[in-house]
Image (cartoon, rainbow, N blue to C red):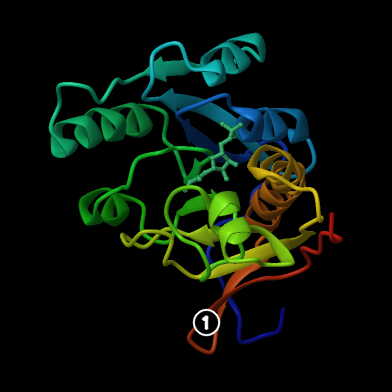
Amino acid sequence: MNDLDTSLVGRTCTPDRPLRVAVLASGGGSNLQALLDARGQGPWDVVNVVVNVAGAGAIDRARAAGVSVVVVPHVGLSRAEHEGRVLDVLGAHDVELVVLAGYMRVVTEVFVSRFPQRILNVHPALLPSFPGLHGARQALSHGCRVTGCTVHLVDGGVDTGPILAQAAVPILDDDNEATLQRRIQLQEHKLLPAVVTAWSEGRVVQRGGLTRCCGVVVAAG
Ligand code: GAR
C-alpha cells in the first residue's frame, strides 16, 4: 500500500465493529465453512448466509455455526424476482461485503449496482482462463500443467471482474476432475478468508486505475 491508494472498505473495521459479511452459496458449502472457521482472523464477521438450493449442505454448516441462514429458492421466479428477494435479506442485515462462495447464479447489473465493488467471487481456475462452469474440467481438457483458483470482484460479467488474489495448483499426471477439484478447493479455503481479512483491514485498494489486494500470498498447493 502507498499514500495514493484508496481503500475499498471505506471505514475502519474493528473487533467491536467488524465488517458485516454475507455469504451466498448453492452447494456443499466448503468455502462457507472455511470462512466460518476463519472468523476472528480479522475485523469481519459472517452475519448472514443466503442459499438458493433447498437441502444444500451450506444450510447445515451455517446453522451449526449459529449464523442466520435464509433459503431463497430461485425455481419458479424470474431472475429479477429472485435477486430482489436476496437483496431484501441482505438489506435487512446491513451487509457491507457479499461473498459468492460456490453461488452458481450469475448476478445481474442491478444486483451489482446495490453493492458496487463490494461483491467477491471465488472461481476454480486461474482467470481469465476458464471462466464459467467446470473450471477444473476445462483446465484438464486443455492439457494445462498448472491451474488454480481466483478471488475477484464481481462486475456483472461472468467471472470478468478485477482479479484480487490467485493461488496455483499443479496438475498431476494421474489427476481426474474430482482429484483436481479437491486440491483446488483446498487452496480456495485459504485464499478466500485471506482476501476477506485483507478487505476488512483496508488492504484492497484502488491504485492507478487498478484494484489491488495487498499482502495475500498463498503457496502453490
Ligand atoms: C467451489 O470450488 C467454487 O470455486 C465453485 O464452486 C465450488 C463450490 O464448492 N464455484 C464456481 O464454479 C463458480 N463459477 P463449495 O460449495 O464446497 O464451496
Q: x, y percentage for residue 155?
A: 36, 63
Question: Can you say which quadrant of the picture contains the N terminus?
Answer: bottom right
Label 1 belongs to which residue? 210
Quick one: 96 or 131, which is closer to the camera? 131
Seen in the image, is 5 located left or right of residue 93? Answer: right
Question: Can you say which quadrant of the picture contains the C terminus?
Answer: bottom right
Quick one: 6 or 178, which is closer to the camera? 178
Placement of 125 over or under 69, stated as above or below: below
Q: x, y percentage for residue 183?
A: 76, 44
Placement of 54 over or under 98, stated as above or below: above
Q: x, y percentage for residue 22?
A: 49, 35
- The reply to whether the residue tagged 1 has its Cβ within 8 angstroms of ligand 1 is no
For the point 54% across and 28% down, the residue is 47
Label 1 crowd (10 A; few <14 / some 14-19 / many >=20): few
- Count of numbered badges drawn on the protein: 1
Placement of 158 over or under 96, stated as above or below: below
Amino acid under disc 1 = Leu
Seen in the image, is 145 located left or right of residue 125? Answer: right
Toward which corner of the image does residue 60 lie, by quadrant?
Answer: top right
Q: x, y percentage for residue 46?
A: 59, 31
Q: Is residue 121 visible?
A: yes
Q: Secondary structure at mark 1?
A: strand
Quick one: 61 or 40, which is closer to the camera? 61
Seen in the image, is 212 located left or right of residue 24? Answer: right
Q: Quadrant of ligand 1?
A: top right
Q: Is residue 151 visible?
A: no
For the point 56% across and 56% down, the residue is 11
For the point 30% across and 31% down, the residue is 86
